Image (tube, rainbow, N blue to C red):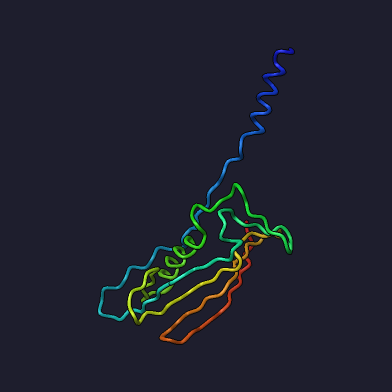
Amino acid sequence: MMKWIPVALALLLSACSSSPQKTYYQLPALGAPAAASSSGASTRQLWLEHVSVADYLAQNGVVYQTNDVQYVIAQNNLWASPLDQQLQQTLVTNLSSALPGWVVSSQPMSSDQDVLNVTISGFHGRFDGKAIIRGEWVLNRQGRLIKRPFSLELKTG
C-alpha cells in the first residue's frame, strides 16, 4: 500500500501541472461573395479601408464582460488570427453578398470608389448571456463623409 502513495502523488502532481487545452475561434462569413458582373452595367466600388478594434479587443483572447465594469480576456479561448483582420475579411464577404451591383474589396480599386472605415468599440460576450457588438462606421462617398454608430445586443444560445 505504501509503495503506491508516491505513484499516486506523482500522478496527481502531473495532472495539476498540465495546462488546459486552448481553443481557437474564427469568425464565420454569413454568405459567399457575389460574383462580379462582367456586363456593361456600371458597378459601384467600395473599399473597406480599415477595421480597427479597441485596445482591450486587440488581444489574442476572447473577451467576456463579467459585470457592468469588469472584463476578462480569456487565456484558453483565443482568436485564430487577429480580430481586426477577421472582422475585415468577414465584412468584405458579407457586404459583397448583401450589396448586389457593388464590388467590395479590402484593397483600393480606383479613385472614384467609396471608402468605408469601421471602428469596433465592443465585441464580447456578457454576463447576462448577450453578445455585444458596438462601434461606428465612416463612409467617404465622393468627398462627403457619413458617420453612423451601431450597437447590437444578440441573445446567445
| Left or right placement of residue 95 versus residue 9 in this view | left
Q: Residue at 41% of width from left, 69% of height from top?
A: 97
| Left or right placement of residue 99 versus residue 55 in this view | left
User: Can you give x and y, in whole percent of width and height, for residue 79 in the image?
Assistant: 53, 53
Query: Residue 43, located in which quarter of the rendered image?
Result: bottom left
Vertical position of residue 114 compared to residue 8: above or below: below
Q: Residue at 61% of width from left, 38% of height from top?
A: 19
User: Can you give x and y, in whole percent of width and height, for residue 112 in the image?
Assistant: 35, 82
Query: Residue 123, located in which quarter of the rendered image?
Result: bottom right
Camera-side residue of 55 and 74: 55
Number of marks in the rendered image? 0
User: Can you give x and y, in whole percent of width and height, for residue 125 in the image?
Assistant: 64, 59
Camera-side residue of 15 and 98: 15
User: Can you give x and y, in whole percent of width and height, for residue 47 in the image?
Assistant: 40, 74
Q: Residue at 58% of width from left, 77% of height from top?
A: 149
Figure quadrant of the C terminus: bottom right
Figure quadrant of the N terminus: top right
Q: Residue at 74% of width from left, 13% of height from top?
A: 2
Vertical position of residue 98 compared to residue 61: above or below: below
